[in-house]
Image (cartoon, helix red, strand yellow):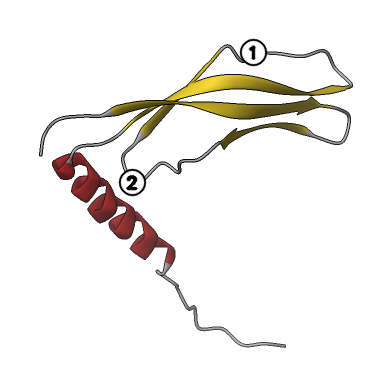
Amino acid sequence: MFTRRTDNIPCTVEIEQTPDSLKAYVVLEGMDPGPGDKVIVHGAPTQIRFGERGTFNCSASIIHAGLFSRQATRILSYLELTELYEIGFSTGSAS
């Protein structure tokens, strides 16, 4: 219930730094993290030169959340989501 499990899996890291885009994606192979899980990528470059893009094969560790942490993450994310639903209306005349 309160223990954490760690899985080591391969992953692909895609990094791009061009005039049009600055992005980094991690694609985990064979496993998806759940609420409250932590992902640590090992061996990925931290930067590339301007104008380049690259794809790198690395490894990742997924530290799975315990039952309490997973439920707390679900509750907090629900509360954060409800803040997006708050809509204000103001009275005014359209001309």
In the rendered image, residue 50, in percent from the top left (x then y), is placed at: 85, 17
Element assignment for label 2: loop
**Residue drawn where x is 20% and y is 50% of the image:** 71
Q: Is residue 29 above or below residue 73?
A: above
* Left or right: 51 as drawn, with respect to 25: right
Q: Quarter holding the C terminus? A: bottom right
How far across and how far down the image is residue 70, in percent? 24, 45
21 sits left or right of 77 in the view: right
Disc 1 on helix, strand or loop? loop
Q: Is residue 73 left or right of residue 20?
A: left
Q: Which mark is residue 58?
A: none
Front one among 60 and 84: 60
Q: CA distance from mark 2 to mark 1?
A: 26 Å
Which residue is at the far left?
1
Residue 69: image quadrant is top left
Q: Nearer the viewer, residue 86 or 13?
A: 13
Q: Are marks 2 and 1 in contact (CB under 8 Å)?
A: no
Residue at figure coordinates x 50%, y 40% from the top left? 30
Q: Position of residue 55 (x, y in %)?
A: 75, 25
Height in image: 82 above or below 74?
below
Q: Residue at x 53, y 20 (%)?
A: 59
Find disc 2 in the rendering and name its residue. 35
All told, the count of numbered labels is: 2
- Crowd around label 2: few <14 · some 14–19 · many ≥20 (10 Å): some
Q: Which residue is mark 1?
A: 46
Amino acid under label 1?
A: Thr
N-term mark: 2 or 1: 2
